[in-house]
Each structure stands twice: as structure tokens, then as C-alpha cells.
Image (spheres, rainbow, N blue to C red):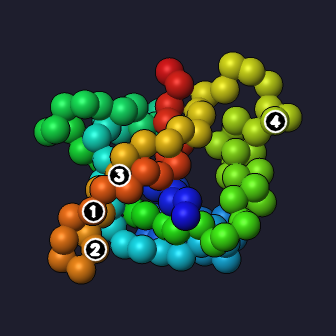
Amino acid sequence: MEYLFIHGSLRTTEGHPLHNYLRGLSDFLGKASMGGIKVDLGEYSGLLPSRDPNERVAGELYRIHDGASEKLFEVLDAYEGCGKDDPEPHEFFRHSQDVTFEDDQKQKIVEAWVYLYAG
């Protein structure tokens, strides 16, 4: 199983049209968080990882449907500006990271894909 952590414009509450595409290829599991710092980049935000237990970024966790990863990441990578056709250096990159979420009132840690700020 593959998971995806969303922390910005594609969250359920943001109303972005690409969110519907995401929901078509994955299942929403619930609220989640990861060690990190949110960076204000003007019209959008970025996420930098952090090992400090006091620095957490809230978001949402999704389980990607079996066989849907390639299709989903082709679109999401392009949206984040780190697709195969985007010029380098990329502002963001996709990385696998530990994410914490509540599963039946119990914290669970899973490895999930997340888009991090390269700056």
C-alpha cells in the first residue's frame, strides 16, 4: 500500500479542482501530521522536514488505490512543478516520510509520500 500526505492547497477544505482527481485515485483516511515547518511562499506554502518533536504540520492522509500511483503522481508532480517535463531546479520534490495519523483513536505511523520545499 502507498500513502500520500497532503498539507496545502489539495486538502478537502480548500476546494481545489484537483482534489476531486486525487479522491478518484485514493481513499481519505483522516487527519494526520508530520515533523516539519510550513513556509509561507506568498500565494502558496512549502513544507520543510524537521526532527524537532515540537514542530508538526497538520494535514490529511490518503491511501492510494492499487495500480493508481503512476497515474496520480504524473498529475501531482506536474502540479507541484517537479514533473518530468518541468525545468530544473524544481521548487518542490516528492519524498517518502513518516506520517502520524489517528486510526481508531490510536496513533499510527506510516510511510507516506509528501511534497517538500526544495528551498
Q: Element type at marker 3? A: strand
CA–CA distance in space, label 1 to label 4: 33 Å
| Residue annotated with mark 3 | 99
Residue occupying image coordinates x 72% and y 66%: 68
7 sits to left or right of 21: left
Residue occupying image coordinates x 28% and y 74%: 103
Residue 20 seen in this snapshot: no
Q: Element type at marker 4? A: loop
CA–CA distance in space, label 2 to label 1: 6 Å
Q: Residues within 10 Å of mark 3 (few under 14, many from 20)?
A: many
| Marked residue nearer the N-terminal end (1 or 3) | 3
CA–CA distance in space, label 4 to label 2: 35 Å
| Marked residue nearer the N-terminal end (4 or 2) | 4
Mark 4 touching mark 2, by CB under 8 A? no
Q: For residue 84, which numbered disc appears in the image?
A: 4
| Residue annotated with mark 2 | 103
What is the x, y in percent for residue 29?
A: 42, 74
What is the x, y in percent for residue 19?
A: 60, 68
108 sits to left or right of 42: left
Mark 2 touching mark 1, by CB under 8 A? yes
Q: Element type at marker 2? A: strand
CA–CA distance in space, label 3 to label 2: 12 Å
CA–CA distance in space, label 3 to label 4: 26 Å
Between marks 1 and 3 in the image, the one whose residue lies nearer the viewer = 1
| Marked residue nearer the N-terminal end (1 or 4) | 4
